[in-house]
Image (spheres, rainbow, N blue to C red):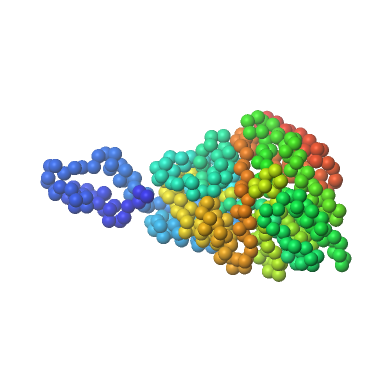
Amino acid sequence: MYLLTKGSIGCITAISIVLLSACTGGAPAGNPTAEKPSAKEEAKNIQDAKLEQAELLILSKVASITQEEFERTIAEPVRAKFPHYKLKYIIEGKETSLQSMMVSGQAPDITITSLAGMQSSLIPLGLEYDLTGLIKKYNYDMSRIEPSTMESLKNATSTSAIYGLPKYLNTVVLFYNKDIFKRFGIAFPKDGMTWEEVTRLTASLTRYEDGTQYRGMSLFYSNMILENQLSLPLIHPTEEKSSVNVPAFQKLLMTYKAIYDIPGNKPEGDITPDKELTAFHKQRNVAMVASPMSGYGRFESDPDLDWDMVAAPTFPDAQGVGYQPNTIYYFISNVNKKAEQAFQVVTELLSDEVQLQANKEGRPTILMDEKIRSSLGSGHKLFKDKNFKAVFYNKFAPMPQANAKMAPLVNASSILQGEFAAMISKGTDVNTALRLADDKINQAIQTAKNK
Protein backbone atom coordinates (compact mmCIF):
# COMPACT_ATOMS: atom_id res chain seq x y z
CA MET A 1 0.00 0.00 0.00
CA TYR A 2 1.07 3.60 -0.59
CA LEU A 3 -0.67 5.06 2.46
CA LEU A 4 1.42 7.17 4.81
CA THR A 5 1.14 7.76 8.53
CA LYS A 6 0.27 11.12 9.96
CA GLY A 7 3.88 11.60 11.03
CA SER A 8 5.31 10.82 7.62
CA ILE A 9 2.89 13.23 5.95
CA GLY A 10 4.39 15.94 8.11
CA CYS A 11 7.79 14.94 6.80
CA ILE A 12 6.99 15.00 3.14
CA THR A 13 4.92 18.13 3.18
CA ALA A 14 7.17 20.26 5.38
CA ILE A 15 8.50 23.38 3.75
CA SER A 16 11.70 23.41 5.74
CA ILE A 17 14.64 21.39 4.46
CA VAL A 18 15.57 21.01 8.12
CA LEU A 19 12.39 19.09 8.88
CA LEU A 20 12.78 17.03 5.75
CA SER A 21 16.32 16.12 6.76
CA ALA A 22 15.26 15.26 10.30
CA CYS A 23 12.56 12.91 9.04
CA THR A 24 14.74 11.21 6.48
CA GLY A 25 18.01 11.18 8.33
CA GLY A 26 19.64 13.32 5.61
CA ALA A 27 22.28 16.05 5.93
CA PRO A 28 21.58 18.89 8.39
CA ALA A 29 20.15 22.27 7.39
CA GLY A 30 22.54 24.42 5.44
CA ASN A 31 24.54 21.42 4.22
CA PRO A 32 24.92 21.92 0.49
CA THR A 33 25.24 18.15 -0.02
CA ALA A 34 21.69 17.46 1.30
CA GLU A 35 19.72 15.65 -1.37
CA LYS A 36 16.39 17.10 -2.40
CA PRO A 37 13.67 14.77 -3.69
CA SER A 38 13.26 14.80 -7.43
CA ALA A 39 10.20 16.40 -9.00
CA LYS A 40 8.87 12.92 -9.75
CA GLU A 41 9.34 11.81 -6.13
CA GLU A 42 7.68 14.97 -4.81
CA ALA A 43 4.70 14.47 -7.11
CA LYS A 44 4.37 10.88 -5.91
CA ASN A 45 4.60 11.93 -2.25
CA ILE A 46 1.90 14.55 -2.73
CA GLN A 47 -0.34 12.04 -4.52
CA ASP A 48 0.18 9.43 -1.79
CA ALA A 49 -0.72 12.01 0.86
CA LYS A 50 -3.93 12.88 -0.97
CA LEU A 51 -4.92 9.21 -0.96
CA GLU A 52 -5.26 9.38 2.80
CA GLN A 53 -8.16 11.82 2.50
CA ALA A 54 -11.19 10.78 0.46
CA GLU A 55 -14.96 10.82 0.52
CA LEU A 56 -16.40 8.05 -1.62
CA LEU A 57 -19.99 7.67 -2.79
CA ILE A 58 -21.23 4.08 -3.06
CA LEU A 59 -24.44 3.28 -4.93
CA SER A 60 -26.08 -0.13 -4.62
CA LYS A 61 -28.47 -1.37 -7.26
CA VAL A 62 -28.97 -4.44 -5.02
CA ALA A 63 -31.75 -3.57 -2.61
CA SER A 64 -31.03 -6.56 -0.34
CA ILE A 65 -27.77 -4.94 0.81
CA THR A 66 -29.41 -2.85 3.51
CA GLN A 67 -28.01 0.19 5.29
CA GLU A 68 -27.42 -2.00 8.34
CA GLU A 69 -25.47 -4.55 6.31
CA PHE A 70 -23.49 -1.78 4.66
CA GLU A 71 -22.46 -0.34 8.02
CA ARG A 72 -21.49 -3.73 9.42
CA THR A 73 -19.82 -5.43 6.44
CA ILE A 74 -18.48 -2.50 4.39
CA ALA A 75 -18.15 0.71 6.40
CA GLU A 76 -16.68 -0.83 9.57
CA PRO A 77 -13.82 -2.75 7.93
CA VAL A 78 -13.01 0.23 5.70
CA ARG A 79 -12.89 2.62 8.68
CA ALA A 80 -10.57 0.22 10.49
CA LYS A 81 -8.17 0.11 7.54
CA PHE A 82 -8.59 3.67 6.24
CA PRO A 83 -9.76 5.88 9.14
CA HIS A 84 -9.53 9.04 7.01
CA TYR A 85 -11.86 7.71 4.31
CA LYS A 86 -15.52 8.68 4.49
CA LEU A 87 -18.15 6.53 2.81
CA LYS A 88 -21.65 7.58 1.77
CA TYR A 89 -24.09 4.81 0.87
CA ILE A 90 -27.18 5.11 -1.32
CA ILE A 91 -29.58 2.32 -2.30
CA GLU A 92 -31.04 3.02 -5.72
CA GLY A 93 -34.72 3.96 -5.75
CA LYS A 94 -37.19 6.07 -7.70
CA GLU A 95 -35.72 9.31 -6.41
CA THR A 96 -32.14 8.07 -6.28
CA SER A 97 -31.70 6.46 -9.67
CA LEU A 98 -28.23 6.33 -11.17
CA GLN A 99 -29.30 8.58 -14.02
CA SER A 100 -30.76 11.23 -11.70
CA MET A 101 -27.61 11.13 -9.60
CA MET A 102 -25.51 11.73 -12.69
CA VAL A 103 -27.68 14.68 -13.69
CA SER A 104 -27.31 16.24 -10.24
CA GLY A 105 -23.53 15.80 -10.30
CA GLN A 106 -23.47 12.93 -7.79
CA ALA A 107 -21.73 10.27 -9.83
CA PRO A 108 -20.89 7.24 -7.67
CA ASP A 109 -17.29 6.20 -7.14
CA ILE A 110 -18.35 2.59 -6.59
CA THR A 111 -21.51 0.92 -7.89
CA ILE A 112 -22.69 -2.45 -6.58
CA THR A 113 -24.56 -4.32 -9.30
CA SER A 114 -24.57 -7.30 -11.66
CA LEU A 115 -23.11 -7.72 -15.13
CA ALA A 116 -26.52 -6.86 -16.53
CA GLY A 117 -26.45 -3.63 -14.54
CA MET A 118 -23.02 -2.85 -15.92
CA GLN A 119 -24.18 -3.39 -19.49
CA SER A 120 -27.47 -1.52 -19.19
CA SER A 121 -26.46 1.36 -16.90
CA LEU A 122 -22.78 1.89 -16.22
CA ILE A 123 -21.32 1.61 -19.70
CA PRO A 124 -24.02 3.73 -21.40
CA LEU A 125 -23.39 6.47 -18.80
CA GLY A 126 -19.61 6.31 -19.19
CA LEU A 127 -18.96 5.00 -15.68
CA GLU A 128 -16.71 2.13 -16.72
CA TYR A 129 -13.05 2.25 -15.72
CA ASP A 130 -10.41 -0.36 -16.48
CA LEU A 131 -8.63 -1.41 -13.27
CA THR A 132 -5.80 -3.22 -15.04
CA GLY A 133 -3.32 -0.43 -14.30
CA LEU A 134 -4.20 -0.31 -10.58
CA ILE A 135 -4.05 -4.09 -10.29
CA LYS A 136 -0.53 -3.94 -11.68
CA LYS A 137 0.50 -0.92 -9.57
CA TYR A 138 -0.58 -2.56 -6.32
CA ASN A 139 0.53 -6.02 -7.46
CA TYR A 140 -2.90 -7.33 -6.52
CA ASP A 141 -3.09 -11.13 -6.57
CA MET A 142 -5.98 -11.98 -8.90
CA SER A 143 -5.43 -15.72 -8.42
CA ARG A 144 -7.24 -15.40 -5.07
CA ILE A 145 -10.52 -14.80 -6.91
CA GLU A 146 -12.85 -17.44 -8.37
CA PRO A 147 -11.72 -17.34 -12.03
CA SER A 148 -15.20 -17.79 -13.54
CA THR A 149 -16.31 -14.46 -12.03
CA MET A 150 -13.52 -12.59 -13.80
CA GLU A 151 -13.96 -14.57 -17.01
CA SER A 152 -17.64 -13.65 -16.99
CA LEU A 153 -16.80 -9.99 -16.44
CA LYS A 154 -14.39 -9.91 -19.36
CA ASN A 155 -16.79 -11.82 -21.61
CA ALA A 156 -19.53 -9.30 -20.87
CA THR A 157 -17.66 -6.61 -22.81
CA SER A 158 -15.92 -6.47 -26.16
CA THR A 159 -12.70 -5.11 -24.64
CA SER A 160 -11.83 -7.74 -21.99
CA ALA A 161 -11.32 -4.82 -19.61
CA ILE A 162 -11.56 -5.28 -15.84
CA TYR A 163 -14.24 -2.79 -14.83
CA GLY A 164 -14.79 -4.14 -11.34
CA LEU A 165 -14.08 -6.85 -8.80
CA PRO A 166 -16.63 -9.36 -7.46
CA LYS A 167 -18.36 -8.86 -4.11
CA TYR A 168 -20.15 -12.21 -3.71
CA LEU A 169 -21.53 -14.88 -5.98
CA ASN A 170 -24.74 -16.83 -6.33
CA THR A 171 -25.67 -19.92 -8.32
CA VAL A 172 -28.47 -22.43 -8.83
CA VAL A 173 -28.86 -25.18 -6.22
CA LEU A 174 -31.56 -27.76 -5.49
CA PHE A 175 -33.69 -27.06 -2.40
CA TYR A 176 -35.81 -29.84 -0.94
CA ASN A 177 -38.60 -30.16 1.63
CA LYS A 178 -37.63 -32.83 4.14
CA ASP A 179 -41.20 -33.33 5.35
CA ILE A 180 -42.45 -34.44 1.92
CA PHE A 181 -39.57 -36.89 1.52
CA LYS A 182 -40.27 -38.31 4.99
CA ARG A 183 -44.00 -38.51 4.25
CA PHE A 184 -43.39 -40.74 1.25
CA GLY A 185 -40.45 -42.66 2.74
CA ILE A 186 -38.02 -41.55 0.04
CA ALA A 187 -34.32 -40.87 0.66
CA PHE A 188 -33.20 -37.25 0.49
CA PRO A 189 -31.40 -36.06 -2.66
CA LYS A 190 -27.61 -35.78 -2.50
CA ASP A 191 -24.81 -33.76 -4.02
CA GLY A 192 -23.59 -34.97 -7.41
CA MET A 193 -26.88 -36.16 -8.92
CA THR A 194 -27.52 -36.01 -12.68
CA TRP A 195 -30.61 -34.62 -14.39
CA GLU A 196 -31.70 -38.17 -15.23
CA GLU A 197 -31.56 -39.18 -11.56
CA VAL A 198 -33.41 -36.05 -10.42
CA THR A 199 -36.10 -36.54 -13.09
CA ARG A 200 -36.73 -40.09 -11.82
CA LEU A 201 -36.80 -38.81 -8.25
CA THR A 202 -39.32 -36.14 -9.29
CA ALA A 203 -41.61 -38.80 -10.74
CA SER A 204 -41.52 -40.84 -7.51
CA LEU A 205 -42.53 -37.78 -5.47
CA THR A 206 -45.34 -36.60 -7.76
CA ARG A 207 -48.59 -38.05 -6.45
CA TYR A 208 -52.08 -37.15 -5.21
CA GLU A 209 -52.63 -37.93 -1.55
CA ASP A 210 -55.16 -36.84 1.11
CA GLY A 211 -56.66 -34.21 -1.15
CA THR A 212 -53.34 -32.64 -2.12
CA GLN A 213 -51.53 -32.86 -5.43
CA TYR A 214 -47.86 -33.14 -4.54
CA ARG A 215 -45.38 -32.07 -7.18
CA GLY A 216 -41.93 -33.57 -7.27
CA MET A 217 -40.12 -30.49 -8.54
CA SER A 218 -40.44 -26.93 -9.78
CA LEU A 219 -37.94 -24.69 -11.56
CA PHE A 220 -36.87 -21.09 -11.07
CA TYR A 221 -36.23 -21.25 -14.77
CA SER A 222 -35.20 -17.64 -15.48
CA ASN A 223 -31.71 -18.04 -14.00
CA MET A 224 -31.52 -21.61 -15.26
CA ILE A 225 -31.90 -20.38 -18.85
CA LEU A 226 -29.76 -17.25 -18.68
CA GLU A 227 -26.96 -18.78 -16.58
CA ASN A 228 -27.25 -22.20 -18.19
CA GLN A 229 -24.81 -25.03 -17.53
CA LEU A 230 -23.91 -25.40 -21.21
CA SER A 231 -22.51 -21.83 -21.45
CA LEU A 232 -24.84 -21.04 -24.36
CA PRO A 233 -25.13 -17.44 -25.57
CA LEU A 234 -28.59 -16.14 -26.48
CA ILE A 235 -27.22 -13.61 -29.00
CA HIS A 236 -24.33 -14.45 -31.29
CA PRO A 237 -21.18 -12.88 -29.78
CA THR A 238 -19.93 -11.34 -33.04
CA GLU A 239 -22.97 -11.29 -35.33
CA GLU A 240 -26.17 -9.38 -34.72
CA LYS A 241 -28.50 -12.36 -34.63
CA SER A 242 -30.10 -14.83 -32.24
CA SER A 243 -28.26 -17.98 -31.13
CA VAL A 244 -31.08 -19.87 -29.43
CA ASN A 245 -32.38 -22.09 -32.23
CA VAL A 246 -29.56 -24.62 -31.94
CA PRO A 247 -29.33 -28.30 -30.83
CA ALA A 248 -27.66 -27.41 -27.51
CA PHE A 249 -30.59 -25.19 -26.45
CA GLN A 250 -32.93 -27.96 -27.58
CA LYS A 251 -31.11 -30.32 -25.19
CA LEU A 252 -31.38 -27.81 -22.34
CA LEU A 253 -35.08 -27.06 -22.76
CA MET A 254 -36.00 -30.71 -23.31
CA THR A 255 -34.32 -31.53 -19.99
CA TYR A 256 -36.40 -28.88 -18.20
CA LYS A 257 -39.57 -29.83 -20.07
CA ALA A 258 -39.18 -33.47 -19.02
CA ILE A 259 -39.69 -32.35 -15.40
CA TYR A 260 -43.03 -30.74 -16.26
CA ASP A 261 -44.11 -33.61 -18.54
CA ILE A 262 -44.35 -35.92 -15.53
CA PRO A 263 -48.13 -36.42 -14.98
CA GLY A 264 -49.26 -34.28 -12.07
CA ASN A 265 -46.11 -32.16 -11.88
CA LYS A 266 -47.24 -29.31 -14.11
CA PRO A 267 -48.88 -26.45 -12.16
CA GLU A 268 -52.29 -25.17 -13.13
CA GLY A 269 -52.42 -21.99 -15.20
CA ASP A 270 -49.50 -19.83 -16.22
CA ILE A 271 -46.14 -20.32 -14.58
CA THR A 272 -43.50 -17.83 -13.52
CA PRO A 273 -40.19 -18.40 -11.71
CA ASP A 274 -41.54 -16.58 -8.66
CA LYS A 275 -44.67 -18.75 -8.50
CA GLU A 276 -42.54 -21.88 -8.76
CA LEU A 277 -40.40 -20.88 -5.77
CA THR A 278 -43.42 -19.71 -3.79
CA ALA A 279 -45.13 -23.08 -4.29
CA PHE A 280 -42.15 -24.70 -2.59
CA HIS A 281 -41.90 -22.56 0.54
CA LYS A 282 -45.47 -21.26 0.94
CA GLN A 283 -47.85 -23.82 -0.49
CA ARG A 284 -45.57 -26.67 0.63
CA ASN A 285 -46.82 -29.04 -2.10
CA VAL A 286 -43.50 -29.12 -4.02
CA ALA A 287 -40.77 -31.49 -2.86
CA MET A 288 -37.83 -29.85 -4.68
CA VAL A 289 -37.09 -26.59 -6.45
CA ALA A 290 -34.06 -25.70 -8.55
CA SER A 291 -33.40 -22.07 -7.69
CA PRO A 292 -30.61 -19.55 -7.11
CA MET A 293 -29.10 -20.17 -3.70
CA SER A 294 -30.16 -16.66 -2.62
CA GLY A 295 -33.75 -17.90 -2.65
CA TYR A 296 -33.21 -19.23 0.85
CA GLY A 297 -33.61 -15.67 2.07
CA ARG A 298 -37.35 -16.07 1.59
CA PHE A 299 -37.44 -19.01 3.97
CA GLU A 300 -36.70 -16.80 6.97
CA SER A 301 -40.41 -15.97 7.05
CA ASP A 302 -41.21 -19.70 7.17
CA PRO A 303 -39.44 -20.95 10.30
CA ASP A 304 -41.43 -24.20 10.33
CA LEU A 305 -40.29 -25.20 6.84
CA ASP A 306 -37.86 -28.10 7.22
CA TRP A 307 -35.59 -27.67 4.21
CA ASP A 308 -32.08 -28.23 3.02
CA MET A 309 -30.14 -28.00 -0.24
CA VAL A 310 -27.85 -30.03 -2.48
CA ALA A 311 -25.85 -29.13 -5.57
CA ALA A 312 -27.76 -28.57 -8.80
CA PRO A 313 -28.07 -31.69 -10.98
CA THR A 314 -25.66 -31.93 -13.90
CA PHE A 315 -25.63 -33.48 -17.36
CA PRO A 316 -24.11 -36.98 -17.68
CA ASP A 317 -21.66 -35.81 -20.33
CA ALA A 318 -20.60 -32.82 -18.20
CA GLN A 319 -20.74 -34.13 -14.65
CA GLY A 320 -19.45 -31.69 -12.08
CA VAL A 321 -20.29 -28.63 -14.18
CA GLY A 322 -22.91 -26.47 -12.52
CA TYR A 323 -24.45 -23.16 -13.51
CA GLN A 324 -22.68 -19.94 -14.34
CA PRO A 325 -22.06 -17.78 -11.27
CA ASN A 326 -24.62 -15.04 -10.76
CA THR A 327 -22.13 -12.54 -9.40
CA ILE A 328 -22.52 -9.13 -7.80
CA TYR A 329 -19.58 -6.81 -8.40
CA TYR A 330 -18.04 -3.62 -7.11
CA PHE A 331 -17.70 -1.45 -10.22
CA ILE A 332 -15.27 1.44 -9.87
CA SER A 333 -15.57 4.68 -11.84
CA ASN A 334 -13.08 7.50 -12.22
CA VAL A 335 -15.56 10.31 -12.87
CA ASN A 336 -14.59 11.97 -9.60
CA LYS A 337 -10.87 11.13 -10.00
CA LYS A 338 -10.97 8.80 -7.00
CA ALA A 339 -10.46 5.44 -8.68
CA GLU A 340 -7.32 4.68 -6.71
CA GLN A 341 -8.97 5.29 -3.35
CA ALA A 342 -11.99 3.26 -4.46
CA PHE A 343 -9.69 0.44 -5.53
CA GLN A 344 -8.08 0.42 -2.08
CA VAL A 345 -11.50 0.20 -0.46
CA VAL A 346 -12.69 -2.62 -2.71
CA THR A 347 -9.55 -4.72 -2.30
CA GLU A 348 -9.89 -4.37 1.46
CA LEU A 349 -13.45 -5.70 1.16
CA LEU A 350 -11.98 -8.68 -0.69
CA SER A 351 -9.59 -9.44 2.16
CA ASP A 352 -9.76 -12.84 3.84
CA GLU A 353 -11.20 -11.34 7.03
CA VAL A 354 -14.06 -9.45 5.39
CA GLN A 355 -14.91 -12.27 2.99
CA LEU A 356 -14.92 -14.79 5.84
CA GLN A 357 -17.46 -12.74 7.79
CA ALA A 358 -19.78 -12.33 4.80
CA ASN A 359 -19.40 -15.99 3.85
CA LYS A 360 -20.36 -17.13 7.34
CA GLU A 361 -23.50 -15.01 7.11
CA GLY A 362 -24.54 -16.67 3.84
CA ARG A 363 -23.04 -14.39 1.16
CA PRO A 364 -20.90 -16.88 -0.83
CA THR A 365 -17.28 -15.79 -1.03
CA ILE A 366 -15.61 -15.02 -4.33
CA LEU A 367 -12.30 -16.29 -2.99
CA MET A 368 -10.78 -19.65 -3.88
CA ASP A 369 -9.71 -20.30 -0.27
CA GLU A 370 -11.26 -23.66 0.70
CA LYS A 371 -11.15 -22.87 4.41
CA ILE A 372 -13.24 -19.75 3.87
CA ARG A 373 -15.59 -21.54 1.47
CA SER A 374 -16.22 -24.32 3.98
CA SER A 375 -17.55 -21.75 6.47
CA LEU A 376 -20.47 -20.71 4.22
CA GLY A 377 -23.60 -20.14 6.30
CA SER A 378 -21.95 -21.32 9.54
CA GLY A 379 -22.71 -18.02 11.24
CA HIS A 380 -26.29 -17.65 10.02
CA LYS A 381 -28.62 -17.16 12.97
CA LEU A 382 -31.31 -19.49 11.57
CA PHE A 383 -29.74 -21.76 8.95
CA LYS A 384 -26.21 -22.57 10.12
CA ASP A 385 -26.92 -26.32 9.98
CA LYS A 386 -27.82 -26.33 6.26
CA ASN A 387 -25.72 -27.86 3.47
CA PHE A 388 -24.42 -24.54 2.16
CA LYS A 389 -21.32 -26.25 0.78
CA ALA A 390 -23.56 -27.38 -2.10
CA VAL A 391 -22.88 -23.95 -3.66
CA PHE A 392 -19.25 -24.91 -4.29
CA TYR A 393 -19.77 -28.61 -5.03
CA ASN A 394 -19.88 -28.19 -8.83
CA LYS A 395 -17.46 -26.27 -10.99
CA PHE A 396 -18.99 -23.00 -12.20
CA ALA A 397 -19.79 -22.99 -15.91
CA PRO A 398 -18.07 -20.16 -17.77
CA MET A 399 -20.17 -17.30 -19.11
CA PRO A 400 -20.11 -17.20 -22.93
CA GLN A 401 -18.79 -14.20 -24.80
CA ALA A 402 -21.50 -11.56 -24.88
CA ASN A 403 -22.43 -9.35 -27.80
CA ALA A 404 -21.40 -6.10 -26.14
CA LYS A 405 -23.39 -3.99 -28.61
CA MET A 406 -26.70 -5.85 -28.51
CA ALA A 407 -26.74 -7.31 -25.00
CA PRO A 408 -27.68 -3.98 -23.33
CA LEU A 409 -30.37 -3.29 -25.95
CA VAL A 410 -32.14 -6.65 -26.36
CA ASN A 411 -33.45 -8.72 -23.45
CA ALA A 412 -33.06 -12.05 -25.22
CA SER A 413 -33.31 -13.99 -21.97
CA SER A 414 -36.77 -12.59 -21.22
CA ILE A 415 -37.95 -13.57 -24.70
CA LEU A 416 -36.72 -17.15 -24.37
CA GLN A 417 -38.12 -17.45 -20.85
CA GLY A 418 -41.51 -16.31 -22.14
CA GLU A 419 -41.55 -18.95 -24.87
CA PHE A 420 -40.47 -21.60 -22.38
CA ALA A 421 -43.32 -20.69 -20.01
CA ALA A 422 -45.80 -20.69 -22.90
CA MET A 423 -44.52 -24.12 -23.96
CA ILE A 424 -45.12 -25.56 -20.48
CA SER A 425 -48.56 -23.97 -20.10
CA LYS A 426 -49.80 -24.78 -23.61
CA GLY A 427 -48.00 -28.07 -24.12
CA THR A 428 -46.22 -27.05 -27.34
CA ASP A 429 -42.95 -28.68 -28.38
CA VAL A 430 -39.41 -27.46 -27.83
CA ASN A 431 -38.69 -26.86 -31.51
CA THR A 432 -41.65 -24.49 -31.79
CA ALA A 433 -40.63 -22.60 -28.66
CA LEU A 434 -37.07 -22.12 -29.92
CA ARG A 435 -38.21 -21.06 -33.38
CA LEU A 436 -40.60 -18.47 -31.95
CA ALA A 437 -37.94 -17.17 -29.54
CA ASP A 438 -35.41 -17.01 -32.37
CA ASP A 439 -37.77 -14.93 -34.51
CA LYS A 440 -38.64 -12.55 -31.67
CA ILE A 441 -35.02 -12.02 -30.66
CA ASN A 442 -34.05 -11.26 -34.25
CA GLN A 443 -36.94 -8.81 -34.52
CA ALA A 444 -35.81 -7.10 -31.30
CA ILE A 445 -32.26 -6.85 -32.64
CA GLN A 446 -33.49 -5.27 -35.86
CA THR A 447 -35.63 -2.79 -33.92
CA ALA A 448 -32.63 -1.84 -31.77
CA LYS A 449 -30.47 -1.32 -34.85
CA ASN A 450 -33.05 0.96 -36.47
CA LYS A 451 -33.31 3.30 -33.49
User: Where in the figure is residue 167, as x and y percent of width and height?
Assistant: 53, 52
| Number of numbered tags placed on the structure image | 0
* Residue shown at 43% from the left, 46% from the top: 140
Judged left or right of residue 81, residue 448 is: right
* Residue shown at 34% from the left, 47% from the top: 48
User: Where in the figure is residue 45, as x and y percent of width and height?
Assistant: 30, 46
* Residue shown at 85% from the left, 46% from the top: 426
User: Where in the figure is residue 93, as x and y percent of width and height?
Assistant: 60, 53
Q: Image height check: is 215 above or below 30?
A: below
* Residue 99 visible somewhere in the drawing: no
User: Where in the figure is residue 312, as x and y percent of width and height?
Assistant: 68, 52
Image quarter where the C terminus lies is: top right
* Residue shown at 67% from the left, 53% from the top: 192
Judged left or right of residue 54, residue 161 is: right
* Residue 238 visible somewhere in the drawing: yes
Q: Nearer the viewer, residue 174 or 225?
A: 174
Q: Image height check: is 32 above or below 353?
A: above
Q: Nearer the viewer, residue 91 or 277?
A: 277
Which corner quadrant of the image does residue 405 belong to?
Answer: top right
Which corner quadrant of the image does residue 43 belong to?
Answer: top left
Judged left or right of residue 384, residue 182 is: right
